[in-house]
């Protein structure tokens, strides 16, 4: 079971329930097909660096999950079909990426917020 | 006095003497997070283009990871594809 990470950007024109509904739709799609969600976090509304579909802000959502390989195509077909999703990016995580996410979750970078968090993980 | 009259025909090559090192190997960073915008800002110039290795001094292995992380960040709207002044 490979570990994957998907970032989804939803249009900002959605109400809170619509956002929740879209996100639960995808998380249920994942869990029904045998995926195991490791971590989900919302970055909320963020300003985009360039307008996507004529909108300058987007609702970001990140899910990290373990899934069999063939589920990714199904998920991406669904993501493409849903027009509320402006953009998405799915990557597979190698061991360094998993270790990095693990460290991030355990708050290894939060001790000294002012230093740049990339060099922080060097000392671990 | 005489120094001012000296006009160089070609610009004197200012040698960047400090030893460049790959910050990823030195700090033991193994993974470059594409979601971390302000860390990636260090590797792009103010037009949003990826800086070459000769300026940043990163090793080839990590330069590829940086380039891929920047491209992913651009895809999800964290970094711009092109801009006039990012910093």
Image (spheres, coloured by chain):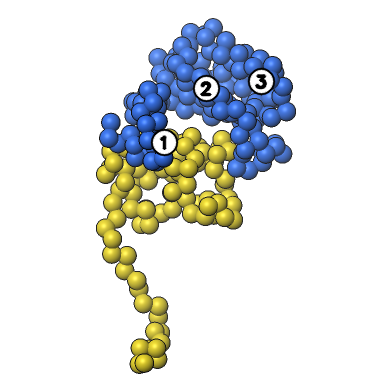
Residue B53 marker: none
Closer to the chain start, of discs 1 and 3, is 3
Question: The disc numbered 3 marks a residue on which chain?
Answer: A
Disc 1: which residue: A113
Determine the secondary structure under disc 2: strand
Within 10 Å of the Cα at label 1, are there few (<14), some (14-19), or many (20+) other Cα atoms? few
What color was chain A assigned in the picture?
blue
Q: Nearer the viewer, residue A26 or A70?
A: A26
Closer to the chain start, of discs 3 and 2, is 3
Same subunit, tags 1 and 3: yes
Determine the secondary structure under disc 3: helix
Disc 3: which residue: A19
Is there CB contact under 8 Å for labels 1 and 2? no
Residue mark closest to the camera, 1 vs 2: 1
Q: Nearer the viewer, residue A115 or A58?
A: A115
The chain coloured yellow carries which letter? Answer: B
Question: The disc numbered 2 marks a residue on which chain?
Answer: A
**From the viewer's perspective, is A124 left or right of A38?**
left
Q: Nearer the viewer, residue B72 or A103?
A: A103
**From the viewer's perspective, is A104 left or right of A14?**
left
Quadrant housing residue A74:
top right
């Amino acid at each position: 079971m490979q570990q994957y990470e998907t970032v989804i950007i939803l249009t900002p024109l959605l109400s809170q329930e619509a956002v929740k509904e879209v996100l639960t739709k995808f998380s249920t799609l994942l869990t029904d097909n045998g995926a195991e969600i490791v971590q989900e976090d919302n970055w909320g509304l963020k300003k985009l660096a360039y307008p996507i579909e004529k909108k300058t802000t987007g609702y970001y959502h990140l899910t990290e999950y373990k899934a069999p390989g063939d589920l990714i195509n199904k998920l991406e077909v669904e993501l493409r079909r849903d027009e509320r999703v402006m953009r998405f990016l799915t990557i597979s995580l190698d061991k360094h990426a998993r270790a990095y996410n693990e460290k991030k979750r355990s708050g290894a970078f939060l001790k000294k917020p002012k230093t740049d968090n990339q060099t922080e993980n060097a000392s671990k | 006095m005489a120094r001012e009259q000296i006009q160089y025909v070609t610009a004197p090559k200012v040698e960047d003497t400090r030893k460049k090192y790959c910050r990823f190997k030195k700090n033991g960073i193994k993974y470059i997070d594409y979601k971390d915008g302000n860390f990636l800002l260090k590797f792009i110039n103010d037009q949003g283009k990826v800086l070459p290795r000769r300026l940043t001094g990163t090793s080839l292995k990590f330069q590829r990871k940086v380039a891929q992380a920047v491209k992913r960040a651009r895809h999800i709207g964290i970094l711009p594809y092109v801009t006039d002044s990012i910093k």
